[in-house]
Amino acid sequence: MTNLNNNVAGVDTDFDVVVVGAGFAGMYMLYRLRQQGMRVRVLEAGGSVGGTWYWNRYPGARVDTETMFYSYQFSDELQQEWEWTQRYPSQQELHAYAKHVADRFDLWPDMQFDSPVEKTTWSEDRQSWTIETTDGALITSQYCVMATGCLSAVNTPKYKGLEDFSGSVYHTARWPEEGVDFSGLRVAVIGTGSSGVQSIPVIAEQAAQLTVFQRTGNYVIPAHNRALDPEEVAAIKADYPALRAKASASFSGNYFPVGGQSAMAVSEEERNREYESRWQEGGLAFMAAYADFMTSEEANETASEFIRDKIRGIVTDPATAERLAPKQLFMCKRLCVGTDYYETYNRDNVSLVDVSETVIDEILPEGVRVGETVYEVDAIVLATGFDAMTGALKRIDIRGVESVSLRDLWEDGPRAYLGLAISKFPNMFIITGPGSPSVLTNMIPSIEQHVDWISDCLTHMRINGVSRIEPELDAQEEWVAHVNEIADLSMRSTCSSWYLGSNVDGKPRIFMPYIGGFPAYVRKCNEVVEAGYAGFAFR
């Protein structure tokens, strides 16, 4: 394979590009770079491809975006040949899809598994990166692409006594490949975010007794998951270009037709008809019922109360229903999609413990202590999510110009230009980094947009005979200020959530994703390119 970049730059390295992570971002990045004739090595901590859909094997794990759209679009042949079986496929099906992509495009030879990256260091003398894995192996590359994912660094709370618990402890994001049988056991699930919402109903079917510890009630829209009708699939595949274009033009990169501009511009009766229709349809499309949910507290409260009333109508015990009914506004935290979540609390073997005010004091050998009450259990499931957006990057010792530490630079919160690159870290790119739409959008189209931008940038550099790129500090700071400014206009930034790092003790409270919408972000990225990569410095 021709080493095009090194022919121009004269940089002597093992590879042109090292990509960290073999999820959907890392696989597509590898595909694009190989198309450009580059020598690439992908380093992956796990044992296979898939990223999120390799690690998250917990009971009930499935995507909350409809999979006819939560899929690659770079290859029409791939779109046409792969057959999804469900509206919201399971982790197993998504992992099978990832492996199929690696097979189809022969990606395996350039990927190295069970190789967590421990350190990456920039050399001014060599104008290259040295990447060190946990086993001490050293690899050099001219460019480094971080495809580490937004939700990959596990958040394990530091409960006093957890290591002394006499039973088994599991985390939803690191579930045993062989699975877990909870039959006859007393189980505690700590956390009611997306992984808790999906796993709790399944665990409840097995466990003798399930005790759920909830800090914050979440809004859960029913998935109404179902097998896909072959005629429906054929119609979507025949119209994929138009459907993809509609999705790309939407705020979230999903095709959710907006019901109306304002919930307050219609009568209560009409509003409730729209909400009921969205509830029966199921899924994240409920967010698009009205356009002003994020800017009008009054409009938002109408949707909030509609869902709270649904919970009260489903859960038979009034006290439990009120504990489950969220106090924060709808969509302030991540909206969850589940199957029989609220119904599960009607089971005789399921109980709910509110730890919003009386917190978990400690884990004892026999169970979980909250105040003066000890809940005796045989197994604990930590559904406590991730150190989102920044955790995976900060857990690697990344050293830039003059050995500056990324951990130190981001001590008060992440700072990146377009969520793509960081000043003082030349020739390093991030896929869906902080400051990009990422987790507020359909992730795979957002990944593809970033990968395409990075690939085109490297082609531009090769054609123009330059070998080094770095964001200008002023441009980076202007972008960070813009991200913060528009975040302040949205009610998403007004409550504690992992978007702000609120789920991790000691983490700075800064709204990390770009909330201006996918189309606005893509326009900005295109404008930067059209202006000669404005805000970037080349050598």
Image: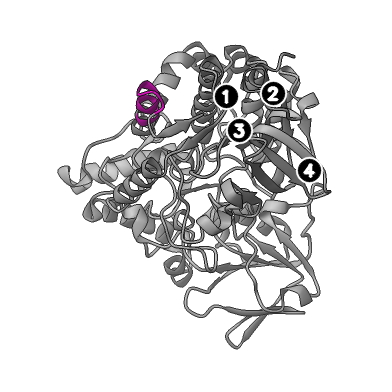
Look at label 4 and name its amino acid.
Ser
Q: Which residue is mark 3?
A: 25
| Residue 19 drawn at (x, y percent) | 67, 34
Q: Which mark is residue 115?
A: 4
Q: Classify 10 Å Cα crowding around label 1: few (below 14), some (14-19), many (20 and above).
A: some
Residue sitting at the far front: 125
User: The disc labelled 3 sits on which kind of residue?
Assistant: Ala
Question: Alpha carbon of mark 2 to alpha carbon of mark 3: how far?
Answer: 12 Å
Marks 3 and 4, the one that precedes in the sequence:
3
Crowding near the residue tagged with mark 2, few <14, some 14–19, many ≥20 C-alpha atoms within 10 Å: many
532 falls in the magenta region: yes
**Magenta stretch mostly in which secondary structure?**
helix
Question: What separation in Å lies between label 1 and label 4 (alpha carbons)?
Answer: 25 Å
- Give the residue displayed 51% in from the left and 24% down from the top: 457
Q: Nearer the viewer, residue 49 or 510?
A: 510
Residue 72: which disc? 1
Q: Which quadrant of the rendered structure holds the N terminus?
A: top right
Residue 296 in view in this figure: yes
Q: Mark 2 or mark 1, which has the lower sequence index?
A: 1
Residue drawn at x 71%, y 41% is: 130
Instruction: Classify mark 4: helix, strand or loop.
Output: loop
- Asked if one can make out residue 45 in the rendered structure from this viewpoint, the answer is no
Q: What is the distance, in whole Å, between disc 4 and disc 2 at their CAs?
A: 21 Å
The type of residue carrying mark 1 is Tyr
Q: Are marks 2 and 3 in contact (CB under 8 Å)?
A: no
Residue 335, compared with residue 352, is above or below; it is above
Alpha-carbon neighbours of circle 4 within 10 Å: few (<14), some, or many (≥20)?
Answer: many
Image height of 94 relative to 311, above or below: above
Q: Over which residues does the magenta segment extend?
A: 524-533
Helix, strand or loop status at disc 3: helix
Q: Which residue is mark 2?
A: 101
